[in-house]
Amino acid sequence: MQLVALFAFGLFLIGYEEVSAAVNVNSMASAINNKLSSLLAPRFKSLSAFSKSARMVKPKIDFVMLLDSSGSVKERYFEYEKQAAQILVDYIHNKAPIGYRKSRVALIEYSVSAHFEFRLHTYSTPSAINRRIRQVKFDNGGRTATGPALSKAKTELQVNGRSGNVKLVWLITDGYSNSGGNPKIPADQLRAMGATVCVMGVGSSVKWSEVKQIANRDCIFRADSFAETRTIMRKAYSLSLGTRTPRLPDNFFSGLVI
């Protein structure tokens, strides 16, 4: 009986540590930068169908952000969430430039229900995207429809995603889904179509067992507050500026067989 009690207490401590230990901001920023840098690393591209030469090119990405706008977030903290989203846009633009025929961004806001603030084809510059993010109003909804938000992300990538583009879904939440069905289903469907799903859990009310079902295993991140979320993203962006790919001579890959 004592062994059972000790085992149960040990499991409690493990779970408690997972959600209660203070976030190391620098380590979290580094983890985010490492993951995004890996996803957005330059690729080899053949100069033509008949050429033996290749060059390194920046990738193109279809990036869908999902912002929790339920009442628990609070309006003043939602501003921090939006600012973190704007920094993410700048990060993406640095690694995979945003443009009409380049990388694109969509934003879904969710609480009681999920709705698009803008689609992948709506804006073609980071300044226009960030200006629109600043205008997003807080929903203050009484429920958290994570599943429908992920379903909308899946539909957007199916309808407006471009073949060959990296597909990334980034969800920020301070709680857990309590409306609209099991969010694991659309998350699995997103992964089945080649998308990476990342989750930033904020605060002490996040249901981590659910997050682990939604996100890719190596794309789960934490912050103790929405203000800290913004700080982490700023640090990740700063790290990205120091990890640019060095320019190689134009003839470096000459003769490389593809």
Image: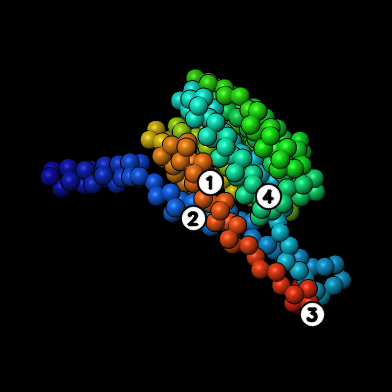
Q: Is residue 154 visible?
A: no
Task: Kindly check if marks 2 and 4 are in contact, taking CB atoms under 8 A apart as contact.
Answer: no
Q: Secondary structure at mark 3?
A: loop
**Disc 4 secondary structure class:** helix
Q: Earlier in the sequence, mark 4 or mark 3?
A: 4
Q: State which tag comes first along the sequence, 4 or 1.
A: 4
Please, what is the three-letter code of the amino acid marked with disc 4?
Answer: His
Residue type, numbered disc 3:
Gly
Image color mode: rainbow
- In the image, taking residue 168 as reference, residue 31 lies left or right, namely left
Q: Amino acid at mark 1?
A: Met
Amino acid type for the residue under numbered disc 2: Ser
Residue 76's disc number:
none
Disc 4 to disc 3, how far (Cα)?
31 Å
Please report the residue visible at 64 percent of the width from the left and 40 percent of the height from the top.
Answer: 64
Say which residue label 1 marks: 233
Q: Residue at x 69, y 53 (%)?
A: 96
Mark 1 closeness class: few <14, some 14–19, many ≥20 residues within 10 Å: many
Q: Work out which quarter of the rendered image holds the C terminus and state it.
A: bottom right
Q: Tag 3 or tag 2, which sits nearer the N-term?
A: 2
The residue drawn where x is 35% and y is 41% is: 19
Q: Is residue 242 left or right of residue 116?
A: left
> Is residue 82 something that shows in the picture?
yes
Say what secondary structure mark 2 lies in. helix
Of labels 2 and 4, earlier in sequence is 2
Residue 86 lies, in percent from the top left, at 61, 40
Few, some or many residues within 10 Å of mark 3 (<14, 14–19, 20+): few
Which residue bears the numbered disc 2? 30
Q: CA distance from mark 4 to mark 1?
A: 14 Å
